[in-house]
Amino acid sequence: MDRAEYLERVSELLPSIAQRAADAEKLRRIPDETFKEFQERGLLAALQPASWGGFELDPPALFEAVMRVAEACPSTGWVLGVLGVHHWQLALFPEAAQREVWGERPGSQISSSYAPTGKVEVQEGGYRLSGRWSFSSGCDHCEWVFLGGIVPGDAPEMRTFLLPRSDYEIDDTWHVAGLCASGSKNIVVDDALVPEHRTHRFLDGFKMQSPGNQRNPGPVYRLPFGTVFSNAIAFPVIGAAQGALDSFREQTRSRLASYDRTRVADDSFTQVRFAQAAADIDAARERLGANWATLMASAKAGRPVSMEFRARCRWDAANAVRLSVAAVSRLFEVSGGRAIYLDNPIQRAFRDVHAMRAHAVNNPEKGARVFGRSELLPSDGPADFLL
């Protein structure tokens, strides 16, 4: 399936996703109907290797889908981005791990929690994991999980550990104000054994020299881990902001001010706020799109991606989040009292983009520091492994 057909399949689902958005919030996870449609149409297999039944599309195809879905329901777009990018990372694992997940069930899904909050012990042939990991979006629909952990030793290293559903419990702690329908619950592990082949070193992803590259040599899998992952959770913020802008435009065209019955669309302050929000959203989308044109051209030509450009991509992703959150906030401020009602999609977008911004990778100050340091102190080397 090519990009055009993939995105057509996405667009066909948007009306039903939007219709379910309010119920999804009450359910506190994406509805079974939505997940079934994702599976049947292969929307989660965009970055899955073709040799394992996926479509092996370039990441911008998935990111465009994420934006479109997030316009209809930000939480659902967030889950599509998070779960969708996990297929890309699994392709970097040793082939034995890929075979365990995709060998008999190519449609198996993986949730994640990368913050190394659990305990890792080295054991012959593998590792023992125990503890609690938070914010595992979409975990109710998944048979596997990626968990971040630090392997102890003289030179501690960060790894992703892959565990099957039988090795962990889901603790339903997800009672929140934003991204309510993402189902980002806790993962609890009690002394699970993870073999060596079900681990992936962050350093390998950083160097773009992962074990899985032997099985999956395509250019899609020769991209920086940090760049791919950070964009997977930046694009849904842009989509949510675009959805808020569209709702605001539709509502404002027919809205009358309650105190004097004048047309709100005639208000110059409202017009300026709309223009500013539209410009910020367009700037965020276009900057990331330009970055990905450069990234894919480099990957397909076999050219290395410089640390300076990777730092710029890191900053641009975080800045896109900043611009999108600011855009939604401007719109919310001039939406009037009706905006706070739960049947108004603008209030959902307002809550959801702030929840997305709370993710550590979407911190614009951190992204700016990484970029600024790479430009001003290049001799010091990379400032962040998420590049």
Image (cartoon, grey):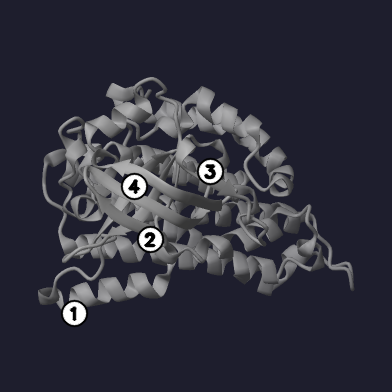
Q: Name which quarter of the figure residue 330 lies in.
A: bottom right
Secondary element at image label 1: helix
SS assignment at label 2: loop
Of residue 240 and residue 125, the one placed in the foreground of this image is 125
Nearest to viewer (mark 1 / mark 3): 3
User: What residue do we see at 18% from left, 40% from top?
Assistant: 211
**Disc sitting over residue 161 in the figure:** 4
Circle 3: residue type = Cys
Give left or right: position of 14 versus 280: right
Residue type at the position of mark 2: Pro
Mark number for residue 116? 2
User: Please, is residue 69 above or below residue 151 in the view?
Assistant: above
Q: How crowded is mark 4: few (under 14 residues within 10 Å), some or many (20 or more)?
A: many
Residue 215 in sight: yes
Instruction: Give the Cα separation between the discs numbered 1 and 4.
Output: 35 Å
Towards the viewer: 256 or 343: 343
| Left or right: 96, with 239 as reference point | left
Point out the tag, 1 or 3, that comes first from the N-terminus. 3
Query: Disc 3 on helix, strand or loop?
Result: helix
Circles 1, 4 touching at the beta carbon (< 8 Å)? no
Residue visible at 14% across and 71% down in the picture? 381
Left or right: 306 in relation to 37:
left
Q: Which mark, by number, is residue 376?
A: 1
Residue placed farthest to the bottom in the image? 376
Q: Which circle marks residue 139 in the picture? A: 3
Q: Position of residue 5 (x, y in %)?
A: 44, 25
* Residues at marks 1 and 3 touching, judged by CB atoms closer than 8 Å: no
Q: Distance between the residues labelled 1 and 2?
A: 30 Å
Amino acid type at image mark 4: Phe
Give the mark nearer the N terminus: 1 vs 4.
4
Are dots 1 and 2 in contact, CB under 8 Å? Answer: no
